[in-house]
């Protein structure tokens, strides 16, 4: 069945040759990519597509901005000689420390997607990319493919996915179900079938069903073996394959086994796999060793995250190669791979080995688990390692326990007193280590974590003092590390300044941070937000532009930029920013709400209604969006529904001034003046606002409470920034009424 032009394509078949045959029957296949993680680990598929595209067209023709350079070199680091990158970009890779930038790999996935969409948009005809073995891809490739499936228009770029089954992890599974048309191609019966005696052919067909093996796969086995002189046996699949392999020459068996190893053990050819399994252990290890040496000669960094450590492991080498892969993945925020290589590296060590490699692999396993949100697993690992003798390892374990209690555990499980005790233990173990730059950095980080504990316990002054000590200590004891690692400490001190209302000091601190790390997108984004709060809108916009320039796409700078554009009354530009945020995160609650509010203000009520309905599917109890729904219902003339929406909003959040004020409007129109006055009084206490005070004045005026109404109108005039004639008119009416009453009283 031909795939729909409005959908991408998902082909499910147990054997690769059948998937490729099904894809080959379509039109316009531009790239076929094997996504199996054994090849290059994280971003095997994305990196291969980058390399193919770069080979097709010089990257200079793309006019790459820093964010694109950073994205492409993250997934295909061996292209450093082919992708022109600035000194700042090279330095940026020194700053990418594990855990510092939340959601970093999702940013990379969006950056890759936009790069490919732009590249294929320039093609003269529709293109197609086929990612095979997607079910065996690294989670980061699966994350990228899921985003590409969502964002690519199948009429321009058809994304085709090949898997051996429907058993796939999220988020890729949901993307496949939503954006693809699935097909289950039948094996191409008779393709490459050798001339077999009739009994053999019938026997193979029956066995294919009984063994649940594709007919083509058995025919492939038969094509390597002379069966004419044999009678069909009565045997299991393993016995049949043993018999087939036994009839091959030693050279043929060796060639098949080498073929399997050179596929990085990803081949699904039965005979090659069985020939490999039948080799003596020493022969298998030699094949893996030879493959590893050949790959190392290519001098490509991404191979050291996949095939090279894999073959080193199979050749029964030491744990150092796997540790190197785990370290690199931790540094780049590739936590699933970092954890996997750490686990496998530990398995390679002698159970009695408690040396440096063991400590570092355990450290990576522990912190990768933490950063993946596997908190119970991390806690168990800590408990198992508390009996170790190595101070360095015990320092890591105690720090992990401290940060679990201070930050990661659910609020009901957090124990700041316990966190402080664990951090103190970690400090004691760290101080026992020999002086070194890494020891200095660890001691500074422990002070930073202790500052977090103090802050969470409501002691900001003590927290700031600890942070300042950490910064000064690092600057004096390890100035080289200060240049690359001070950002996290300075950024945390910025947060303390902001919490204390010291906006100017926070801006100065961020400016100092950016002198050390001019590519820190988050610092630009945060400084832009502070400029916005200070009314320096043009400065804010410049910082948001720099935040976008120095990072693959993420929502924050665009969301904040939209708010600044709204403040500058540039509504259409703000809408474009909200639109882009929702391209990156279709269920982004704040973007949906802010766009709905802006559309409402622009009287585009139908579009606002769509955003409201979307957000309520995502966040049914969101008080602010319920409030906007009430406003839309008012516009439709359904005051009962509007009243109910405002009431439900208040049940969700009684601190929402808009809901009180809007419900008061309905009550006023119904003549329920006391109830309206009560709601407006609640609103005014929550947020002194010209419109709220004006409306309360109207209610008081309707009750002939002239002095109180005039007082509210006077307060509203003091707060108002726009047209004020209507407020003055009503205040004058109150003054006139009081004057008339005074005359009558006389």
Image (tube, rainbow, N blue to C red):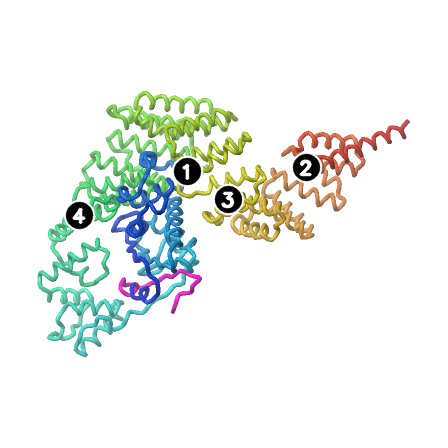
Q: Quadrant for the N terminus, please.
A: bottom left
Magenta residues (range): 1-19
Q: Residue at x 24, y 46 (%)?
A: 303
Dot 2 or dot 1: first in sequence order is 1
Residue matched to label 2: 691
Q: Nearer the viewer, residue 357 or 533?
A: 533
Going from the N terminus, do you reach mark 2 or mark 3 first? 3
Residue 291 locus on image (x, y percent): 16, 50
Residue 184 drawn above or below residue 308: below
Vertically, is 347 above or below 167? above
Residue 500 picture location, percent across and down: 51, 26
Quarter of the image with the C terminus in it: top right
Q: Position of residue 638 (x, y in %)?
A: 68, 52
Res 746 visible = yes
Q: Earlier in the sequence, mark 3 or mark 1?
A: 1
- Residue assigned mark 4: 292
Provide the residue designation for mark 1: 409
From the viewer's perspective, tell me whether residue 471 is left or right of residue 301. right
- Judged left or right of residue 269, residue 739 is right
- Whether residue 449 is visible here, answered yes or no, is no
- In space, the residues marked 2 and 4 are separated at their CA atoms by 72 Å
- For marks 2 and 4, the one nearer the N-term is 4
Q: Which is more N-terminal, label 4 or label 1?
A: 4
| Residue 577: image tag | 3
Left or right of 604, for residue 271: left
Return the residue found at the far left.
250
Earlier-in-chain disc, 3 versus 4: 4
> Helix, strand or loop at disc 3?
helix
Using a 10 Å C-alpha cutoff, classify the residue at mark 4 as few (fewer than 14 neighbours), some (14 to 19) or many (20 or more). Answer: many
The answer to whether the residues at label 3 and label 4 have Cβ atoms under 8 Å apart is no
Q: Nearer the viewer, mark 3 or mark 1?
A: 3
């Amino acid at each position: 069945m031909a795939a729909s032009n409005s959908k991408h394509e998902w082909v499910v078949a147990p054997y690769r040759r059948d998937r490729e045959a099904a894809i080959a029957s379509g039109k316009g296949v531009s790239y076929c990519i094997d996504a199996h993680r054994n090849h290059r680990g994280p971003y095997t598929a994305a990196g291969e597509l980058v390399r193919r595209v770069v080979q097709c067209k010089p990257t200079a023709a793309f006019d790459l901005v820093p964010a694109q350079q950073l994205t492409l070199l993250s997934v295909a680091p061996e292209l450093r000689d082919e992708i022109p990158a600035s000194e700042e970009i090279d330095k940026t890779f020194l700053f990418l420390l594990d855990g510092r930038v939340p959601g970093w790999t999702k940013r990379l996935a969006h950056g890759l997607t936009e790069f490919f969409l732009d590249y294929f948009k320039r093609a003269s005809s529709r293109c197609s990319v086929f990612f095979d073995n997607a079910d065996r891809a690294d989670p980061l490739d699966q994350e990228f493919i899921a985003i590409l499936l969502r964002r690519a228009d199948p009429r321009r770029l058809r994304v085709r996915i090949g898997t051996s089954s429907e058993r796939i992890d999220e988020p890729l599974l949901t993307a496949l179900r939503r954006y693809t048309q699935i097909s289950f191609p039948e094996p191409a019966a008779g393709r490459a079938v050798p001339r077999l005696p009739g009994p053999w052919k019938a026997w193979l067909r029956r066995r294919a069903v009984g063994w649940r093996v594709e007919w083509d796969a058995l025919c492939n086995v038969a094509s390597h073996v002379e069966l004419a002189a044999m009678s069909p046996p009565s045997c299991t699949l393993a016995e049949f394959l043993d018999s087939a392999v036994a009839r091959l020459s030693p050279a043929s068996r060796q060639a098949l086994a080498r073929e399997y190893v050179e596929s990085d053990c990803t081949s699904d050819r039965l005979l090659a796999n069985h020939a490999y399994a039948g080799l003596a252990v020493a022969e298998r290890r030699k094949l893996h060793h030879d493959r590893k040496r050949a790959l190392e000669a290519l001098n490509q960094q991404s191979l050291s995250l996949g095939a090279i450590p894999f073959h080193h492991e199979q050749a029964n080498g030491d744990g150092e190669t796997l540790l190197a892969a785990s370290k690199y993945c931790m540094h780049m925020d590739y936590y699933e791979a970092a954890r996997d290589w750490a686990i496998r590296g530990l398995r390679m060590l002698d159970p009695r080995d408690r040396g440096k490699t063991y400590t570092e692999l355990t450290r990576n396993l522990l912190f990768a688990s933490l950063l993946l949100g596997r908190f119970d697993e991390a806690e168990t690992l800590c408990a198992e390692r508390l009996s170790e003798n190595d101070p360095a390892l015990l320092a890591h374990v105690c720090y992990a326990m401290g940060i679990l209690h201070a930050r990661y555990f659910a609020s009901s499980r957090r124990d700041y007193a316990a966190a402080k005790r664990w951090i103190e233990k970690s400090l004691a173990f760290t101080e026992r280590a020999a002086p070194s730059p890494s020891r200095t950095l660890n001691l500074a980080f422990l002070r930073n974590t202790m500052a977090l504990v103090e802050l969470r316990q409501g002691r900001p002054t003590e927290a700031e003092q600890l942070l300042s000590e950490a910064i000064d200590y690092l600057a004096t004891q390890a100035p080289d590390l200060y240049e690359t690692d001070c950002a996290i400490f300075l950024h945390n001190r910025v947060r303390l300044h902001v919490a204390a209302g010291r906006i100017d000091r926070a801006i100065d601190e961020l400016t100092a941070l950016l002198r050390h790390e001019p590519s820190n997108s988050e610092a630009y984004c945060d400084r832009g937000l502070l400029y916005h709060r200070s009314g320096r809108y043009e400065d804010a916009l410049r910082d948001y532009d720099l935040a976008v320039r120095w990072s693959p796409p993420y929502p924050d700078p665009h969301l904040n930029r939209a708010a600044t554009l709204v403040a500058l009354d540039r509504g259409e530009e703000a809408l474009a920013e909200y639109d882009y945020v929702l391209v990156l995160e279709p269920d982004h609650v704040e973007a949906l709400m802010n766009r709905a509010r802006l559309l409402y203000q622009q009287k585009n009520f139908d579009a606002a209604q769509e955003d409201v309905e979307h957000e309520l599917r995502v966040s049914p109890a969101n008080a602010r969006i319920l409030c906007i729904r009430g406003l839309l219902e008012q516009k439709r003339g359904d005051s009962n529904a509007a009243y109910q929406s405002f009431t439900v909003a208040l049940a969700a959040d009684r601190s929402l001034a808009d809901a009180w004020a809007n419900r008061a409007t309905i009550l006023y129109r119904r003549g329920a003046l006391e109830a309206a006055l009560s709601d407006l009084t609640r609103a005014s206490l929550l947020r002194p606002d010209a419109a709220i005070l004006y409306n309360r004045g109207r209610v008081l005026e309707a009750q002939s409470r002239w002095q109180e109404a005039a007082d509210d109108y006077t307060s509203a005039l003091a707060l108002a920034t726009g047209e004020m004639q209507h407020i003055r008119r009503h205040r004058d009416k109150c003054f006139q009424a009081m004057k008339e009453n005074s005359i009558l009283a006389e």
